Image (tube, rainbow, N blue to C red):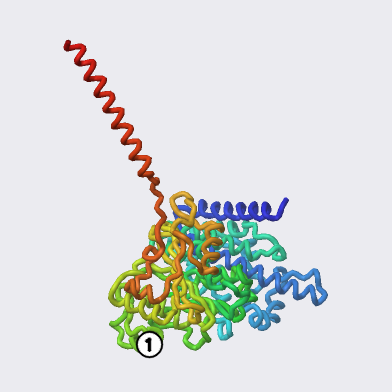
Amino acid sequence: MPTDNRKEQERAELHRAIWNIANDLRGSVDGWDFKQYVLGVLFYRYISENLTNYINVWTAESGDSNFNYEEIDDSRAEKVRKSMVRIKGFFILPSELFANVCKRADNDENLNETLDRIFRHIEDSAAGTDSESDFKGLFDDVDVNNNKLGTDVPARNAKLRKLLHGVQAMQLGNYKDNTIDAFGDAYEFLMGMYASNAGKSGGEFYTPQEVSELLARITTVGKTSVNKVYDPACGSGSLLLKFAKILGTENVTTGFFGQEINITTYNLCRINMFLHDVDYNKFDIALGDTLTAPQHWDDEPFEAIVSNPPYSIKWEGEDNATLINDPRFSPAGVLAPKSKADLAFVMHSLSWLATNGTAAIVCFPGVMYRGGKEKKIRQYLVDNNFIDCIIQLPDNLFFGTTIATCIMVLKRSKADNSVLFIDASAECVKVTNANKLTAENSEKILKTFTERKDIDYFAKLVSNDDVAAQDYNLSVSTYVEQEDTREQVDIVALNRQIEEIVQREQLLRTEIDKIIKEIEG
């Protein structure tokens, strides 16, 4: 079977397995909570198999090819605890591995307590080490004693057994066949499966894969590696992880950085890093409010920044007297409005951007033309030549909103004093009730972004002075002319037709007059 066909078949089987788990648990937990449980157990399976595989290969290379970590006593395993925590960032005893817990699950009347203890042990294994922050609280959202799983312990354990066996049944392949892609695909399928109907948690936490890839590719044009990547509102980390696929994890030399205010999504992001084979020492995901309590002050600037921050949310703004003197915001001389934090995220990203870096940020369209403080911030960005490009995206592209958003591209070092405006509002195909970027759409946008030339009805390179003359309006429609698709009318030909009609009408009237005279005579 060709590789692509096999890959698609394996992916379809994986998705069916996830649906089967959803059907088994339906009615007990809602979609968004269900996703937490599946991802938590999927993560438990992943790290169990990852550790087992590593130790087995390590031992085989030492001459014992029949060794299987799953089968040895816990006391014997303790001998490698310290070295495994140093290398992998965590440790799991053989008796607490996913595979062994699954074997005992049907006969374990205290399965909920067993899982709760194991999850605690995994987190505790990293305590006091460099990986502590990456593992602490990772299983908090997998509440094995939650009443949503059942009203009593037997009912909850019945659900947990179905969950364990369902995840166990997922065909994730052999590690040598790149298992990580299967784990990552399962994660992305679950996110997409529930993002569209997860209420406020939808579009806020999940960016469609095609948009994530476009943002990542915009920031890596002409580069084969970057020092590190950053997302100030990283959600579940899907934007950051696109760099692992585009450049390769090894070509993001220092690692993946982000901050997230929602603790559940913060946990998902860390899990996502592991599921995509990003080691604990190659990512730094922080919890907290990026605008008022940023966690990466002391790091060197980032060569690539991508973000899809929440649209027009409230923030402290001028109510916090310290923010106007914050070096991230003070250069503009004004703070973003308290009711609309969009440009605060833009200013934060610019402050964190390396001299040779590029930032690509999804923006609510209103920030491109509204007056007041937002106009003053746009003026600062344009007058200092930080805005490289504005890309108008199609509407109905993101989960949870039909708004036609834009991408703002920032650079600290530019070759010209102009802004490129691209109208990509028609670059999509309709899929059910939503729009989607195709590979061809993205290639057209990237080619235009790279070549930086005028294209009739699609792109316009506008000098900063001309943008200033338009009162710093950054709406693409202000600069890119819309093509007139109305039917063209040939006025000369139309007048000739009218003249012929009038002549025929006159002849008819003459003939009718003759007939009437003959009748009357």
* Res 121 quadrant in image: bottom right
Q: Number of callouts in the render?
A: 1
Give the secondary structure at mark 1. Answer: loop
Specify the amino acid type for callout 1: Asp
Where residue 291 sits: x, y (%)?
A: 39, 80
Where residue 318 sits: x, y (%)?
A: 29, 82
Q: Is residue 110 visible?
A: no
Residue found at x 33% / y 71%? 470
Looking at the picture, tell me which residue is in the foreground, 148 or 104: 148
Is the residue 155 above or below the residue 76 in the image? above
Within 10 Å of disc 1 (Cα), the crowding (few <14, some 14-19, many 20+) is few
Is the residue 89 above or below the residue 368 in the image? below
Where residue 348 sits: x, y (%)?
A: 42, 80
Is the residue 506 above or below the residue 217 in the image? above
Residue found at x 49% / y 73%? 306
Looking at the picture, tell me which residue is in the foreground, 158 or 194: 194
Looking at the picture, tell me which residue is in the foreground, 396 or 357: 357
Looking at the picture, tell me which residue is in the foreground, 3 or 514: 514
Q: Which residue is mark 1?
A: 326
Q: Is residue 172 visible?
A: yes
Residue found at x 35% / y 89%? 325
Where residue 344 sits: x, y (%)?
A: 38, 77
Q: Quadrant of the C terminus?
A: top left
In this view, the residue farthest toward the right is 63
